[in-house]
Image: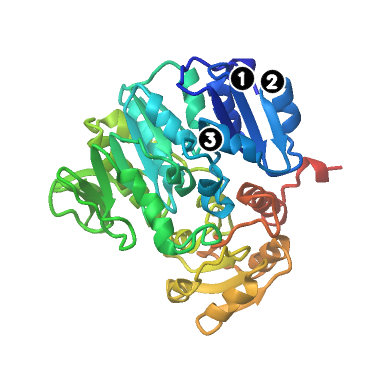
Amino acid sequence: MSNKVSQVSSVTVPYKKVAVIGFGITGQSVIRYLGNSTSELIAMDTREFTVNTRTLKRLFPRVRLVTGGLDQHTLQTADMVVVSPGVSVRQLGLEQQVGPQTELVGDIELFARYAHAPIIAITGSNGKSTVATLVNEMINAGGKRSLLGGNIGIPALDLFAKPTPDVYVLELSSFQLETTESLAADVAVVLNLSEDHLDRYPSFAAYADAKARVYRNARSEVINRDEPGAPQILAAGSISFGLGAPRDDHEFGVVSEQGSHWLARGEEKILNTERLSVRGRQNWLNALAALAIVSQFGMQIDESMLAALCAFEGLADRCEQVADKDGVLWINDSKGTNVGAALAAISGFPQPKILIMGGQGKGADFTPLAQAMDENVREVILIGEDAERLQQVLQDRVSLSRAESLEDAILHARDIAAAGEVVLLSPACASFDMFDNYRARGEAFRTLVNEHVLGICSEEGEA
């Protein structure tokens, strides 16, 4: 953590006593931002000890740290309680614990109150990191200054340490939107919705409602017209995107002509999909969403912006090509932690596929995956905690095998894959049963494919 970032504090807030719940990345950004602006700042974490406790004590000696639970007196007497997105207000019953005059907010609520530039707010179950990155790169390529943060990269409040840009591009999770009231995005979008985080929400409807909050007070909206689960709030001036042919200038879509496919707006063909560096129809959809968002922000799409779009090679763990050996593509979609993400990845590759799936299902319904097996899936290799649940859904639709580890799954896939096929890791599950997070799972996939498919040993394995 740099000294520059740790000393960020230029805000004046009308609160004397503020509590921050959570010692993670977001909680630390809140502490940095509030800094010396309050007479009393208390940080609390339900864990007895976190790796960040010692760092917080060193960087913020005036902040009182409470571990192993929540200080009830502080909750009752604080002017404001700032909750980190990893903390569930509902599950902890925080609304019943705070005082009657206490504001209960998240970091994005603070950001929305004090931002001095327009905000593009992007959420959805899948693809939001990719689309947010594309939008940020296209705007910068087009001559305006954009800063990217939120649920990706830099915490939103840390963006205030930089000179004010022309626009902030924020990737937002449902967890962040739960505690946000004041956001009035210049452009807002819910990219898609699929069952996710049902271990935190009482129902899919509650999860969808949290996502839909991004549209509140928005100046303009971008809608996924192909997504039946996404909020369809078609206000005046809204535009949509989808894989079908656009009918007018309010729609972005795909036009097919003589075997070629074009990203288009209305009758205007914008870009041949062959120019994109990333593969798969799901990436056409991401590109269309980015084009729609940038257009709604009021920028004319020029060749420099299209060049940035075409140069984008994808984010790690999101349909990332790891290897192309003997005609077999190896694709890492470890970020595919829910059913919707897996469905998008499966449909994105028309070639025959061998899937590696499984992990912690977070209470999701796997049933929609059954029909996806008809999309040229030859075999599914199941791993992890919910392999049995997946097997029950898929056993009558596709050839199945079980593997004890990701390494075993890769070895089996290597043995059965043929030229022209794709080996796709898209788990439809979280990774916590076998790995620290999806990034660790993706890194393991890359390492194991390098070793067992490409014959490249890691440094640790070299003599």
Residue placed at 51% from the left, 60% from the top? 338
The mark nearer the N terminus, 3 or 2, is 2
Residue 434 locus on image (x, y percent): 71, 58
Q: Secondary structure at mark 3?
A: strand
Residue 31 visible in the current orientation: yes
Q: Which residue is mark 1?
A: 6
- Please, what is the three-letter code of the amino acid marked with disc 1? Ser
Residue 252 locus on image (x, y percent): 22, 48
- Please, what is the three-letter code of the amino acid marked with disc 2? Leu
Q: Disc count in the image?
A: 3
Q: Which residue is mark 3?
A: 81
Q: Which residue is mark 2?
A: 59
Residue 401 locus on image (x, y percent): 64, 76
Residue placed at 32% from the left, 48% from the top? 273
Instruction: For marks 3 and 2, give the CA distance.
Output: 21 Å
Residue 276 locus on image (x, y percent): 37, 44
Left or right of 163? Residue 62 is: right
Among the 4 quarters of the image, the one containing residue 257: bottom left
Neighbourhood count class around disc 3 (C-alpha, 10 Å): few under 14, some 14–19, many 20 upward: many
The mark nearer the N terminus, 3 or 1, is 1
Instruction: For marks 3 and 1, give the CA distance.
Output: 21 Å
Contact check, label 3 and label 1, Cβ < 8 Å: no
